[in-house]
Amino acid sequence: MNKFVQNQTFYENIDSFNDIISGIRESDKRFVEMIFKKNFTITLYTFWESNVKKILFNHLVEHANIIFTEEFLKSFYRTILNSPNYVKEKYLDSLDKNEIQITQEYYLSSNNLWFDKVVELIQRVYPETSRDDFLKFSNSNLELKETIEKLEKTYISKYSEKNANPDGLEGYIDSLVNNRNNLAHTGECSEYIGFDDMKLYFEFINHILITIEMFLKNLYIQKSTFEHKLIDITSVIFATREARAIVEVTFDSEIVEQFNQEAEEKKYSEWYIKKGDFIYPIAIEKIQDEDKKTVSMLPDNGHVTLEIKSCNIKITKRGDYKLLNLAYFQYENHELSEKKLIFKF
């Protein structure tokens, strides 16, 4: 388990909770256990809300050059006009020297981060996207799907005010929000998660955060990718059930030069595979030249086979795929990346 949950103190210590309680006198065990369970709900919700907003705002800052369109401006003002008074006040406080500065505090404000609210916040950054787009992308994430399947074998319940039988994605998010709200308002909630399921619930939220981050990158690339940046996978030679595949690729001379330079300097590249409208992160685990020799640098002709792995998409021999290196794509647009989250008027 990595990414957002990495080094999260509560998550890292869940395995020791039973040992801690076993060393407490019998009359206090129930009380201490309940403290852990209440704290779990509050901690997981805080982890959820703070990271969603951080992901969205960081993306907005990094890609303002692409995101700031006329449609975004309309959505921005619509959001402010329809916001509660305290948000409008914070917006007014941000006006200075004929400038409007967007901040996370007011533009991504929310009291309860239900599933539908997450979609709304994403639409504040990309007004053109939809709930169905996000659901379709989320449903293609293999690790998230597997985690939901595990949750459905536990006693953790799903919740939705709108749907009597919500799916796992919406149901487990909204259940967390509902339990947190009950604790905040009454000090009690209808469901306390057992120690055995706490890590799994953290991992579920972690996978959704990763999915949101990936979805935003998809929207960014859809909005701005030039076709010449996509690299055709000429054939899928071998595919396994473990989301591994061996594919044949011919890189052009520009990519060969950039790749080899990065390899020498040990720079980090983000590689993605594109299928249909979506991209998914991959790891290149092995490169072989035409003589089937494993190499670390691309040959001059750029013709290689790659062993790749993805935890987010199953690669098949029949699929039509393209490769994208996000670092190469962003390099072309680096001169625009200095744009600040400030409008002048």
Image (cartoon, rainbow, N blue to C red):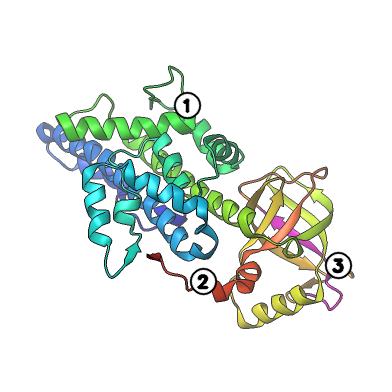
Q: Is residue 192 left or right of residue 200?
A: left
| Foreground pick, 199 / 121 | 121
Secondary element at tag 3: loop
Secondary element at tag 2: loop
| Foreground pick, 319 / 154 | 319
What's under tag 2, amino acid-wise? Ser
Q: Is residue 126 left or right of residue 302?
A: left
List x then y, in percent, for residue 15.
34, 46
Which of the image's four quarters has the C terminus? bottom left
List x then y, in percent, for residue 326.
62, 64
Separation (CA) of disc 1 from disc 2:
46 Å
Please name the residue that numbered disc 3 is placed on: 292
List x then y, in percent, for residue 26.
13, 33
Q: Is residue 316 magenta?
A: no
Sequence order check, earlier mark of 3 and 1: 1
Sequence order check, earlier mark of 3 and 2: 3
What's under tag 1, amino acid-wise? Lys
* Residue extending furthest toward the right: 291
Separation (CA) of disc 3 from disc 1:
45 Å
| Foreground pick, 62 / 96 | 96
What's under tag 3, amino acid-wise? Lys
What's the magenta region? 298-309
Residue at the spot x=86%, y=67% of the render? 292
Vertical side of 213 occupied by 34: above or below: above
Please name the residue that numbered disc 1 is placed on: 153
